[in-house]
Image: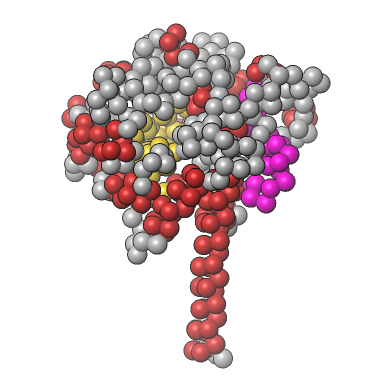
Amino acid sequence: MALKPGAEAVPPETEWPAGLDVRTLLEEGWRPTPFHEFVLKIHSRCNLACSYCYMYEMADQSWRGQPRRMADATIETVARRIAEHVESNGLSRVELILHGGEPLLAGLDGLRHAVTAVRSAVGGGATVNVGLQTNGLLLGPDFLDLFAELDVRVSVSLDGDEEGHDRHRRAPNGGGSYHRVVAGLERLLRPPYRHLFAGLLSTIDLRNDPVATYEALLRFGPPSLDFLLPHGTWEAPPPGAASADSTGASGAPYGEWLVQVFDRWYGAPVRETRVRLFDEIIRMVFDRPSRMESVGLSPFATAVVETNGAIEQVDTLKAAYEGATRTPLHVSRDSFDDALMLPSFAARQIGLRALSDECRGCDLVRICGGGLYPHRYRAGSGFANPSVYCRDLSRLISHIAATVRRDVSELRENGRRRIAVHGRKDGTE
C-alpha cells in the first residue's frame, strides 16, 4: 500500500484509506476506472421505518440535515456533471439509479425531471440506463405509466413471507407493510409493466427459514434476487454474530443460511431465477471478473450524489461511522473526475493493495475480495480488515466452488467415457 507517513493514527479522518497516496499510485502506473454508475439520492426521507436501515438507524445520521427532495437546479447540475464525465472518459453507457430514502416520494414530476435531464445532457452519444429501488408502497398506475414511458427498471425490497418481511419492514406507526408491498408488486407484474421488473432485494434474517424465504420470493417470478447481509461492522456486529472475532470464532450462521438457499436454487431442475451473489461467485470460480460490489476484486465504479448535491461514497458506508460517506466535493464546483482522485474512491479500485494482510494471505481472496467494503470497518484500522462476515463468506464460497467444480469434473469424465465407448464425432476411434 502507498501510505503517507503517520497514516496509522486512530481518528476516522486518518484511518485507512485516508493515508492512501494517490499520486504515488499514479506514478506506479495505476489508472482510475471511470464511474459507470451514478446513484441519485432523489429524496432523503422514507415512508417506512425499517429496523435495520443503514440510512436512518445506524451510525451516520446526516440525513437529518439533508433537503427532503433534490432541487431541480441540483438535478440539472448533476446531469451536466454526468455528461461531462461521459465525454471526458469516452463512455458509451452509464447506469443512473434513483434512490432515497424512498425515491417515489420525489413525485412524478421530480422523477421525470431527473431522468430526462440526465438523458438530455448526455445526448445520443451514450446510453443512459435507468433503474430505481423502491419499497413498493407507492407503486400505482401513475408511477408505472411514467416508468414504462421512460423505460425505468424497478427493483423492490421484500424480505420473504409476511412474517419475515414485517419483522423489520414496518410503517412509522408500527404496522406491517407486507400487503401493501405485494399490492404494488402485483401491479408491477401486470402485462403492460412486467418488462420493467428488475428483481427483488431481500435482507437476511437468521430467524427466517432460508428455503421458505427463497420460495416466498419466487412466487413473484423475479428475474433476479439479491440476498443482502444486514449491515454491520467490527464495532457494531450484525445480529447473530455479536461475539465474532477476527477469525470468525462464533461460526458462520449467515454462510450456512445462504448455503441452504444455494442448494435449493442450484438443485432445481430448471433455472427459476438469477441469484446475483451465487452467479458472481460461480463466475469467479472459473476466473471471470466480478460484476458486483460485495465480492471480487473488480474496481468499484459508483458515485453517489446526495440530495443537496454533495458527491459522496456509496451510502452503505453510513453503517460505519458518522461522516463515513462524506467527501469535500459538490457538483456545483467539482467534477466526477475529481472524485476519482480521492483516497476514499481510489481505495475501492486498487484490488489486493487495499486489503488487509490477513485477506491477502487467504486462498479465497480473489473470489471474496475482502467482502463488502463497509463490513470491514474497525475503529483504529478503518477499512483495512477482513469482513465481519469473513467466516460466512468462506463457508459459502467454499461450498459453491466445491459443488460446481465437482459437477464440471463429472461432466468431463462422462464426456470422456462417451468418446471411449462411441468414438469421436468424426467417426474415428
* Placement of the N terminus among the 4 image quadrants: top right
Q: Where is residue 126 in the image (x, y as percent from the top left)?
A: 45, 33
- Is residue 345 within the magenta segment? yes
Q: Nearer the viewer, residue 321 or 323?
A: 321
Residue 307 seen in the figure: yes
Q: In this view, does 171 lie to the left or right of 35?
A: left
Q: Position of residue 207 (x, y in %)?
A: 38, 41
- The residue that appears at 29% across and 47% down in the rendered structure is 216
Q: Position of residue 250 (x, y in %)?
A: 57, 42
Q: In this view, does 422 lie above or below 33?
A: below
| Residue that extends furthest to the right in the rendered view of this protein | 5
Q: In this view, does 166 lie to the left or right of 93?
A: left
Q: Is residue 278 left or right of residue 42?
A: right
Q: Where is residue 244 in the image (x, y as percent from the top left)?
A: 58, 37
- Is residue 69 within the magenta segment? no
- The residue that appears at 68% across and 48% down in the rendered structure is 362
Q: Magenta span covers which residues?
A: 340-366
- The residue that appears at 32% across and 32% down in the rendered structure is 167
* Placement of the C terminus among the 4 image quadrants: bottom right
Residue 123 seen in the figure: no
Q: Quadrant of residue 356?
A: top right
Q: In this view, does 274 lie above or below 164?
A: below
- The residue that appears at 55% across and 51% down in the rendered structure is 395
Q: In which quarter of the image is residue 235?
A: top right
Figure coloring:
secondary structure
Tag count? 0
